Amino acid sequence: MKKLIPILILLSVGLYLGCGGDDDNGVTPPVTNLRLVVDTTVTDTLLTDALADAWDTVDSLLIDVSGGNPPAKVIPPIAQAIPSDVQIKAISRNDSLYLWLRWTDATFSVWPSVYTISEIEPLRFENRLYKHAKEDQIYVMFDGAPGGGWDVWNWRVLTTGAGGLAEGLTWDNNTLTTDNGNLKVAYDNGSPTGNDPDYCHKDTCEFDGHILLMEDKIHYNDPITVGNDTTYWKATDGWIVGQKIPGFYIDTSLTASYRSDETRGSRWDTRAVSNYESSTTQYTLVLCRKMNTGFAEDIDLTAVDSVKVQIGILDNQQDFILGSSNRGFSEQFWIIF
């Protein structure tokens, strides 16, 4: 026993010196394995293809989102979330932060507020208010928004993603608000409470896609020529029961070079490119925003060496406040610059 006493004394001194000598002005760095270090070596173009080879060499962090862990006062989940995790990578290049995210979703929900044909002659549609037709989406939330709360990037597969963007939001005082910017990516194809679409694709019944572009839409009062006759799209033949017409039409011009950053505002300052692989039922998404946008709502990432982040994933759900198995949130983790 006497031989152990000197050893114990040395251990005690070592612990005292190791813990007491690094006060860091009273601020204790976070002790967690949930850290993602931003890569600064990649120089390739990253916003043309979500599956670009440049991401293959970048370290990733796999984060559990099955347990809920939502921000304060958001309704907790009622069951284990789907998906169970999300993989994330980060690159800093040309004064911008790029985030690569991958998660599993078996349903590929791309028909929010869809119109579904229920009858032919005359053309009638199911009541879309009673259909659970939402869309897949993800929230990337950065703690420390300049006005308080969380600086949020919200990507939705149709209503932002089809325009190559994610929407800027702020989560503060249990309220989610849209950042400044008057432009829109997605426009409701009809009255929000109505049951008939205003527009369809110029190819009428032959179009079966889920993205109705603004430049391809025709109004129900726009005359069209079919053979030798002039008619309107709701009077054309070829429609079938169950056929879908998108609930939104999309403006892709927000990313055009003639649009200035000031015109887009902080609402639309996050670019996006995505891929959904049906064979693996996986989304791969790349988001990009300037480290310092200059907008009052956006956190200046050039002024910090780390930032606390939380990710929320919604499967065919619109409101991230609602607790269900269609919504999962990660634990809070740290991105290190």
Image (tube, helix red, strand yellow):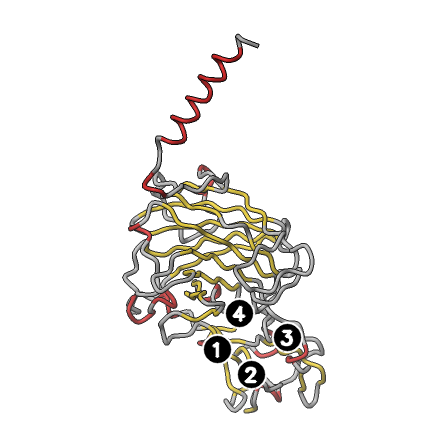
Real-space Cα distance between discs 1 and 2? 10 Å
Picture coordinates of residue 278 (x, y %)?
Answer: 62, 54
The residue identified by callout 1 is 187
The residue identified by callout 4 is 211
Q: Earlier in the sequence, mark 2 or mark 4?
A: 2
Three-letter code for the amino acid on which mark 2 is drawn: Pro
The residue identified by callout 3 is 244
Which SS class for mark 1? Answer: strand
Q: Nearer the viewer, mark 1 or mark 2?
A: 2
- Residue 53 image-quadrant placement: top left
Q: Earlier in the sequence, mark 4 or mark 1?
A: 1
Q: Do labels 4 and 1 touch, CB within 8 Å? A: no
Mark 4 neighbour density, 10 Å: few (under 14) some (14–19) many (20 or more): many
Q: Do labels 3 and 4 touch, CB within 8 Å? A: no
Real-space Cα distance between discs 3 and 1? 17 Å
Left or right for 260, reference 275: left
Picture coordinates of residue 288 (x, y %)?
Answer: 39, 55
Real-space Cα distance between discs 3 and 4? 11 Å
Picture coordinates of residue 151 (x, y %)?
Answer: 41, 60
Q: Earlier in the sequence, mark 3 or mark 1?
A: 1
Q: Earlier in the sequence, mark 3 or mark 4?
A: 4
Q: Nearer the viewer, mark 3 or mark 1?
A: 1
Picture coordinates of residue 14 (x, y %)?
Answer: 42, 22
Three-letter code for the amino acid on which mark 1 is drawn: Tyr
Quadrant where the image shows the C terminus: top left
